Image (cartoon, rainbow, N blue to C red):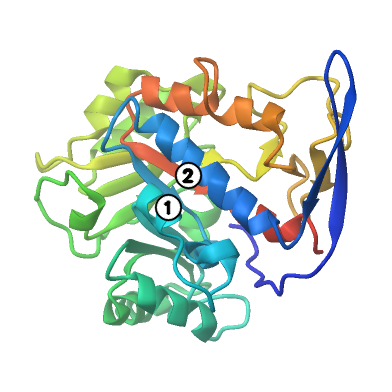
């Protein structure tokens, strides 16, 4: 879970030195321009992945303001961005650290729900609130997965599935429930992890590309695309595009804050992560555009789409 803060765009500016073999160039990206840089990033990821699969699903987590021009909800919708994505993943909408529904976010999502699927992962500190969280989201037309302490910290799959069905699911619009299980550390055995998911009837599953540093095989992901009851489902892969993670295969041993220069800021609460200057070409090459990129590995593994985390880097790079 990432802490959600909403922004008032200011005038802060950062200066980035990028080097090539012949010269040193200075690039300037202002806080005012940073939402558009993230919009462009997501759009380009979408274009790249859909060259391989025209139905490839793109779901940004949070940052719903990016549905509008330069992330400003007072302006017109950004149609290029909306065409590039299939839905929005949202964290802690009705149940959050304030214990109050986030009316600002709900208002934005109400305007978007007729165009895009809204998937909300709530966190309740008491399982007695699960039903209420489900009802609040359902009333708004949002699809929810309710995390408790057990399945948040220990990756335990809930026994009951809200709106369980045996439908064949081929698009995000058909989804009635989902499983948010991007942390598989509770499963020491990959086979046990796969077995646990295979024995469920969720319409949509979010998981990581790796288990203990090993990429899932295409045949393993294909098996997950069938529910226990025989229906088909979607399997979507987590990908962090706004922060670099030290435990990923792209991480170099000598990297640290400021080296390379686009490792810009420590990620509070996550010792193994750094906010990145996501517009930097070196970072973008890690994410998409070539056979060794993270996105290509996801495609090669047979996933139906990507779940893009830390979209809010456009805010957190400039604020504490």
Is 148 placed above or below 16 here?
Answer: below
Q: Residue at x 31, y 23 (%)?
A: 220
Sequence-first disc among 2 and 1: 2
Q: Is residue 136 left or right of residue 234?
A: right
Q: Are marks 2 and 1 in contact (CB under 8 Å)?
A: yes
Residue, disc 2: 43
- Location of residue 41 by image quarter: top right
Q: Position of residue 238 (x, y in %)?
A: 48, 40
Q: Residues within 10 Å of mark 1 (few under 14, many from 20)?
A: some
Q: Residue 110 is drawn in which quadrant?
A: bottom left
Q: CA distance from mark 2 to mark 1?
A: 7 Å
Secondary structure at badge 1 equals helix
In the picture, the disc for residue 233 is none
Q: Secondary structure at mark 2?
A: helix
Return the residue at label 1: 80
Q: Nearer the viewer, residue 314 or 320?
A: 314
């Amino acid at each position: 879970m990432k802490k959600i803060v909403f922004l008032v765009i200011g005038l802060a500016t950062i200066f980035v030195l990028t080097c090539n073999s012949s010269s040193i160039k200075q690039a300037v990206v202002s806080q005012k321009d940073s939402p558009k840089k993230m919009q462009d990033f997501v759009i380009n990821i979408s274009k790249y992945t859909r060259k391989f699969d025209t139905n490839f699903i793109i779901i940004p987590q949070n940052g719903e303001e990016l549905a509008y021009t330069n992330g400003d909800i007072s302006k017109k919708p950004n149609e290029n961005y909306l065409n590039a994505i299939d839905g929005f993943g949202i964290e802690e909408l009705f149940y959050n650290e304030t214990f109050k529904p986030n009316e600002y976010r709900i208002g934005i999502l109400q305007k978007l729900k007729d165009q895009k699927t809204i998937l909300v992962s709530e966190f309740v500190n008491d399982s007695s609130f699960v039903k209420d969280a489900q009802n609040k989201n359902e009333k708004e037309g949002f699809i929810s997965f309710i995390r408790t302490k057990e399945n948040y910290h220990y990756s335990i799959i809930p026994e009951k599935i809200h709106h369980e069905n045996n439908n064949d699911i081929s698009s995000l619009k058909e989804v009635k429930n989902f499983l948010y299980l991007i942390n598989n550390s509770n499963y020491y055995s990959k086979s046990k992890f796969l077995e646990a998911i295979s024995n469920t009837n969720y319409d949509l599953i979010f998981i990581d590309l790796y288990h203990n540093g090993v990429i899932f095989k295409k045949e393993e992901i294909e098996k997950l695309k069938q529910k226990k009851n025989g229906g088909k489902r979607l399997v979507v892969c987590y990908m962090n595009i706004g922060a670099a993670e030290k435990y990923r295969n792209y991480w170099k041993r000598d990297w640290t804050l400021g080296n390379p220069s686009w490792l810009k800021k420590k990620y509070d609460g996550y010792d193994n992560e750094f906010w990145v200057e996501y517009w930097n070409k070196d970072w973008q090459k890690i994410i998409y555009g070539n056979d060794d990129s993270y996105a290509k590995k996801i495609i090669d593994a047979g996933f139906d789409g990507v779940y893009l985390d830390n979209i809010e880097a456009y805010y957190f790079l400039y604020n504490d």
